[in-house]
Image (cartoon, rainbow, N blue to C red):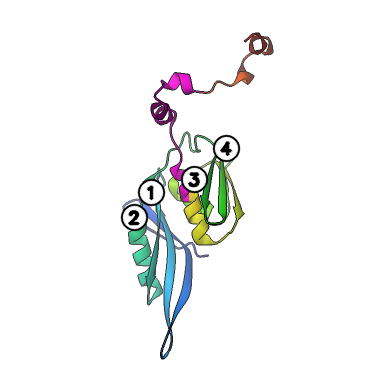
Amino acid sequence: MSTAAKETDGIQDRVIAVSRVAKVVKGGRRFSFSALVVVGDSKSKVGFGVGKAGEVPDAIKKASEQAKKNMVHIEQIDGTIPFQVEGRFGSSLVQMMPAKSGKGLIAGGPVRIIVELAGITDIVCKIHGSRNGHNVVRATMDGLSQLLTIHQYAAKLGRPASEVQQVRLAKQPKSAALKK
């Protein structure tokens, strides 16, 4: 896995994987290169793309252009995600959990690169099942695209945000929690 980074207009791109692919033809094999690239603005937007070409730089350039077209906004609260979420693609499952401020990025492989480029600073992630880079990237993007703010969630339910907001009982004295 290469982590070559390039910056244009505040958008960074990182190469997740480059692989050589072959097409069998009458005279033998034709080789080309496939690249998986993730781009992000380190604030709240991130996207991924796959490019294929005869040379590695061309494949990376194509993947980067596709990734910029596919950028999505990621909801976050104080540098972490609003709630626990699972992303699935193929046999890959990525669990992402919010973390307290200062905990840092506890994530491996492609997930770490995606959350860094999305601007998330505190998160705990675990990959289950297939660890294929392409599947993990798609599963991570699936999970991050499920995130909503409390106002979006309340609007979806047709209720006010104050009614939907969870109140933790741990902050109240035990006697007050038992009386309810």
Q: CA distance from mark 3 to mark 4?
A: 16 Å
Tell me, for residue 68, which label it has, or none.
Answer: 2
Tell me, for residue 99, which label it has, or none.
Answer: 4
Tell me, for residue 41, which label it has, or none.
Answer: 1
Q: CA distance from mark 3 to mark 1?
A: 19 Å
Amino acid marked by disc 3: Gly
Q: Residue at x 44, y 47 (%)?
A: 118
Tell me, for residue 97, which label it has, or none.
Answer: none
Tell me, for residue 143, which label it has, or none.
Answer: 3
**Which is more N-terminal, label 1 or label 4?**
1
Q: Nearer the viewer, mark 3 or mark 1?
A: 3
**Which is more N-terminal, label 2 or label 4?**
2
Q: Which residues are magenta?
A: 141-165
Q: CA distance from mark 4 to mark 1?
A: 21 Å
Image quarter (top left, top right, bottom left or bottom right) of the C terminus: top right
Question: Magenta includes 130?
Answer: no
**Which is more N-terminal, label 4 or label 3?**
4
Amino acid marked by disc 1: Asp
Q: Nearer the viewer, mark 3 or mark 2?
A: 3
Q: Position of residue 144 (x, y in %)?
A: 47, 44
- Mark 4 lies on a secondary structure that is loop
